[in-house]
C-alpha cells in the first residue's frame, strides 16, 4: 500500500543510465529525498533517444525501483532534457519608465521582462527556460531589483535556453507512454547548477561541468 504524501519526482534519461529521484515536500516547504531508482540506459545516445522501445523499458525499471524505495506511486515527473540541439543566449529587453516621478513600478518590471521574452527563434525551436539575469537602469547595470528606483530607461537581460521542438517531444512521448504525466521539462545543465551551487557561488559566477557518458 503506497503512502500518501506530497512528492516531486525528477527523471533523467541519460546515455549510460536512467535516474529517477523522489522528493517529499514537508509542511515547512523543505524537500527531502525519500527514494531513488536507476537502470542501465540502452536506447539513448548523446542524451537523446535513439530506440524508444528500449528506452521505455529502461525508464519503467527505474521508475519501479524509485516507487519501491520511496513507497509511493509515481504519476508525474519533471523531465530532464539535453542534447546537441539545445542552445542558450542572452536577450535584452527595454521599457521606458513613463511615471511623472520616474519611479520604477512592478508594472514596469513586468513589462520589460515581457519585452525581453519577445524573441525570434527558428520556426522549429521552442523556449525551454527564460532566466532573468539582472536589470539596467539608465546605464547602471547589475541591479537585482529596480522597484522604487528612479530612471527613464529600464532594461533587463534574460538567459534564454531553447531547443528543437520535435527532438524535445521524443523523450516526452516515451514517458507519457508509461502513463506518466510530464509536469515540466528542465535543461539538465540548469538542474545540476541549481542543485549544487549555493547562492553565493551563483553570485560569484561558479561553473558546474557535468561530463556525461555521451559527451
Image (spheres, rainbow, N blue to C red):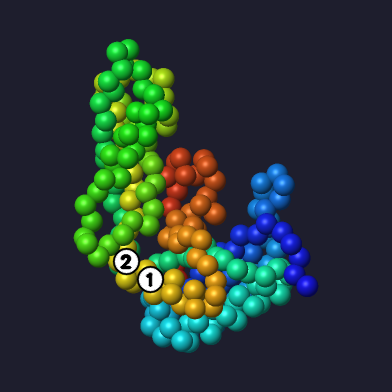
Front in this rendered view, residue 79 or 48:
79
Residue 141 visible in this rendered orientation of the protein:
no
Q: In the picture, residue 211 is in which quadrant?
A: bottom left
Give the crowd class for mark 2: few <14, some 14-19, many >=20 residues within 10 Å: some
Q: Residue shown at 42%/45% (left/top)?
A: 205
Q: Residue furthest front?
A: 179
Residue 52's place in the image compared with 113, above or below, is below
Residue 130's place in the image compared with 46, above or below, is above
Q: Residue shown at 54%/46% (left/top)?
A: 198
Indicate the position of residue 127 as horizontal and vertical percent values: 33, 56
Q: In the picture, residue 125 is in which quadrant?
A: bottom left
Front in this rendered view, residue 141 or 201:
141
Residue at label 1? 169
Q: In the picture, residue 71 is in which quadrant?
A: bottom right
Q: Residue furthest top?
A: 101
Residue at label 2? 165
- Element type where label 2 sits in the image: helix
Mark 2 near mark 1, Cβ–Cβ under 8 Å? Answer: yes
In screen coordinates, is 139 left or right of 210? left
Residue 64 visible in this rendered orientation of the protein:
yes
Give the crowd class for mark 1: few <14, some 14-19, many >=20 residues within 10 Å: few
Front in this rendered view, residue 86 or 206:
86
Indicate the position of residue 178 as horizontal and vertical percent values: 54, 78
Amino acid at each position: 500500500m503506497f503512502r500518501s504524501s506530497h512528492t516531486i519526482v525528477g527523471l533523467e534519461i541519460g546515455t549510460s543510465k536512467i535516474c529517477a529521484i523522489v522528493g517529499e515536500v514537508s509542511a515547512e516547504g523543505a524537500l527531502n529525498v525519500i527514494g531513488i531508482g536507476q537502470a542501465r540506459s540502452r536506447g539513448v545516445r548523446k542524451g537523446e533517444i535513439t530506440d524508444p522501445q528500449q528506452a521505455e523499458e529502461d525508464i519503467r525499471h527505474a521508475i519501479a525501483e524509485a516507487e519501491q524505495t520511496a513507497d509511493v506511486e509515481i504519476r508525474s515527473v519533471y523531465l530532464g532534457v539535453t542534447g546537441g540541439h539545445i542552445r542558450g543566449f542572452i536577450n535584452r529587453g527595454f521599457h521606458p519608465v513613463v511615471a511623472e516621478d520616474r519611479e520604477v513600478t512592478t508594472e514596469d518590471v513586468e513589462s520589460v521582462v515581457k519585452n525581453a521574452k519577445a524573441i525570434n527563434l527558428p520556426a522549429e525551436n521552442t523556449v525551454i527556460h527564460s532566466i532573468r539575469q539582472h536589470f539596467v537602469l539608465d546605464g547602471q547595470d547589475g541591479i537585482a531589483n529596480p522597484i522604487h528606483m528612479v530612471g527613464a530607461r529600464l532594461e533587463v537581460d534574460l538567459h534564454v535556453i531553447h531547443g528543437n521542438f520535435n527532438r524535445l517531444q521524443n523523450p516526452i512521448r516515451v514517458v507519457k507512454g508509461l502513463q506518466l504525466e510530464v509536469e515540466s521539462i528542465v535543461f539538465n545543465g540548469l538542474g545540476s547548477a541549481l542543485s549544487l551551487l549555493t547562492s553565493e557561488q551563483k553570485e560569484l559566477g561558479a561553473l558546474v561541468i557535468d561530463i556525461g557518458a555521451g559527451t
